[in-house]
């Protein structure tokens, strides 16, 4: 039997409905959860991602405040504007879209986002706390996977083997931090896409998470029966039968891997929508915490 499709759009709309209710509950107290973000430069991918975040935020009832700075913006100017934003009590969540232009030191910038408002989970304190199993914001991509697995009942990963083909700070490392927490208890292997004999590792995976941006990188012979397969790829491939002449596919060969999988995320409509939803969820939580601490 083909594996269950983990429908990120459906789950996202359920979560966004819950967020609307939490936002409405804050309104009588004069709190409008506010997400503020910086886009530096004109990279079309980053610009469209920021627009997507802004649109999703306003649709659930958050206030969104995006600042667009020119590509040649100085580091000092970004840091100054960022500090001003972080200090404002009416701003609850702050993010800086990555990557930044080369004249700007990413580490310095990310360290300016106070952990209480660090809805992307990129501040070194947030990263450290995540690894220690302490309360913190974690990057939206792995947070979205964990939420998806919890809500679909595929979250019993104790002493199971999770194989993650990605080692970066946005996906692989924070995913490993979450999966090795005491209450989850998975065994984790982090690997690079060019690791020799990669298939020997991926074939051991009870949970396989892939983010390499290479179309159909994972084929059916690389997975075991019963795998839970999570795909973060986003690749455009030519398709003469499609209206635009191309279509979006993931890193996992969906049709063949679904035949062996217990559950699998589609692309589009799987893990992707959950990422933006988690950013919204983090902002609502930051606003609730800020309000609760004012009451205390
Ligand atoms: N660039 C690519 N993904 C992300 C993300 O999740 N957050 C930010 N701030 N930048 C990104």
Image (cartoon, rainbow, N blue to C red):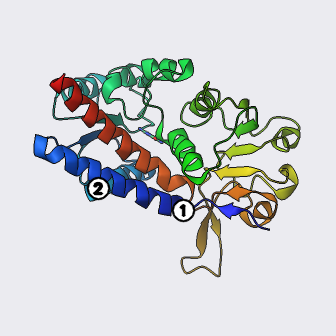
Residue 77: percent from the left, percent from the top?
24, 26
Location of ligand 1 given as a quarter of the image = top left
Residue 296: percent from the left, percent from the top?
19, 21
Query: Is the residue marked by circle 2 packed among few (<14), some (14-19), or many (20+) residues within 10 Å?
Result: some
Q: Nearer the viewer, residue 42 or 266?
A: 266
Residue 190: percent from the left, percent from the top?
72, 31
Question: In the image, which disc is placed on residue 203?
Answer: none
289 on left or right of 151:
left
Query: Is the residue marked by circle 1 packed among few (<14), some (14-19), or many (20+) residues within 10 Å?
Result: some
Quadrant of the rendering where the N terminus is positioned: bottom right
Image point (24%, 48%), residue name: 23
200 on left or right of 90:
right
Image point (48%, 51%), residue name: 274
On the question of residue 39 being in view, the answer is no
Question: In the image, which disc is placed on residue 269?
Answer: 1
On the question of residue 162 being in view, the answer is yes
Residue hosting label 2: 60
Element marked by disc 1? loop
Element marked by disc 2? helix
Image point (75%, 52%), residue name: 217
Image point (11%, 46%), residue name: 28
Decide: is 102 above or below 124.
below
* First reached walking from the N terminus: tag 2 or tag 1: 2
């Amino acid at each position: 039997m083909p594996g269950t499709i983990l429908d990120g759009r459906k789950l996202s709309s359920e979560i966004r409905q819950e967020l609307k209710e939490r936002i409405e509950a804050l309104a009588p107290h004069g709190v409008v959860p506010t997400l503020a973000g910086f886009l530096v430069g004109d990279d079309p991918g980053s610009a469209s991602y920021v627009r997507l975040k802004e649109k999703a935020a306003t649709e659930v009832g958050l206030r969104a405040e995006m600042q667009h700075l020119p590509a040649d913006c100085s580091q000092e100017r970004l840091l100054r504007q960022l500090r001003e934003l972080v200090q404002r009590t009416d701003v609850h969540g702050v993010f800086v879209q990555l990557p930044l232009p080369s004249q700007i030191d990413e580490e310095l910038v990310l360290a300016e986002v106070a952990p209480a408002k660090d809805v992307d989970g990129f501040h070194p304190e947030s990263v450290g706390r995540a690894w220690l199993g302490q309360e913190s914001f974690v990057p939206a991509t792995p947070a979205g996977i964990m939420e998806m697995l919890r809500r679909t009942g595929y979250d019993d990963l104790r002493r199971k083997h999770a194989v993650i083909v990605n080692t970066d700070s946005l996906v692989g490392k924070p995913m490993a931090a979450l999966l090795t927490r005491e209450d989850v208890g998975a065994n984790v292997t982090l690997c690079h896409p060019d690791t020799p004999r990669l298939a020997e590792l991926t074939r051991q995976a009870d949970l396989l998470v892939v983010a390499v941006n290479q179309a159909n990188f994972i084929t059916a012979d690389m997975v075991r029966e019963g795998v839970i397969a999570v795909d973060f790829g986003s690749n455009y491939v030519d398709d003469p039968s499609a209206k635009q002449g191309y279509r979006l596919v993931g890193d996992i060969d969906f049709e063949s891997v679904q035949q062996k999988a217990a559950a699998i995320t589609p692309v589009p409509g799987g893990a992707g929508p959950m990422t933006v939803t988690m950013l919204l969820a983090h902002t609502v939580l930051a606003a609730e915490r800020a309000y609760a601490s004012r009451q205390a």
